[in-house]
Image: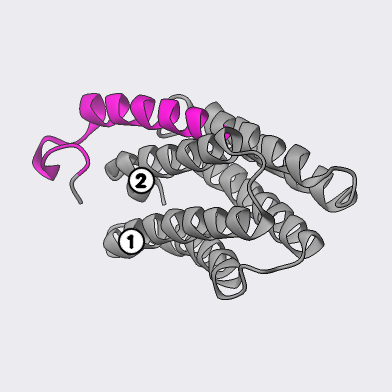
Amino acid sequence: MNDTLLRSWWLLALRGALAILFGAAAMLWPAITLVTLAALFAAFALLAGAVWMFGAVRNRTTDERWWVVLLLGVFSVAAGAVAAVNPGLTALALILLVGANALVTGVLDIIVALRVRKHMRGEWLLVLSGIASVVFGAVVLLFPLGAGALALAWMIGVYAIVTGAMLVTLSLNVRSWWRLNAPRSSGPAGAA
């Protein structure tokens, strides 16, 4: 798993950029319908999951724990597929889906960060992103009807932008570390 993240730092950057775009869309159009919000969430979850799955499969021969990153991607794709197949989910179902996705991906982000902490700088950003996801997911799951659709759009937007910014920052740290510490025979940074 260390090699997967260190060699493919761009996975973190892409996931962060997707989160920022999703968050910005939710905040720029906070009065969008829940169907549109579900479609935006589906697109984000499918793309972010596909990015993780691609990186895991690409590095499976060099990383014995590549399956953890694959699991993160599979869960994200599954959540996105549920939202894509039925974008007319009720408000409660959408809230629970977003909360569950945030909770599970947050826990997996923390696990990944703890596993790579000896091999890279700035892993605390992934821990912070994971903690923010867990807290957001827990709040949403504990109080699913505590906010209206407008407040939900803003909450999701702020959460996505903050965690996305942390992931992009982390990816830049990983890229710098990889370029300084990568074996000279492994090729250019970001290559697998």
Three-letter code, disc 2? Leu
Residue 2 pos. (x, y %): 39, 46
Q: Position of residue 103 (x, y in %)?
A: 70, 51
Name the main secondary structure of what is drawn in magenta.
helix
The answer to whether residue 129 is magenta is: no
Question: Where's residue 56, x and y in %?
Answer: 37, 60
What amino acid is at disc 1?
Phe
Label 2 vs 1, first from the N-terminus? 2
Q: What stretch of residues is rendered in magenta? A: 163-190
Q: Residue 68 at what x, y percent from top left?
A: 50, 60
Q: Which residue is mark 2?
A: 11
Circle count? 2
Q: Which mark is residue 54?
A: 1
User: Is 71 on the left-hand or right-hand side of 156?
Assistant: left
Instruction: Relative to 116, say whether 102 is above or below.
Output: below
* Residue under the point 72% across and 60% down: 94
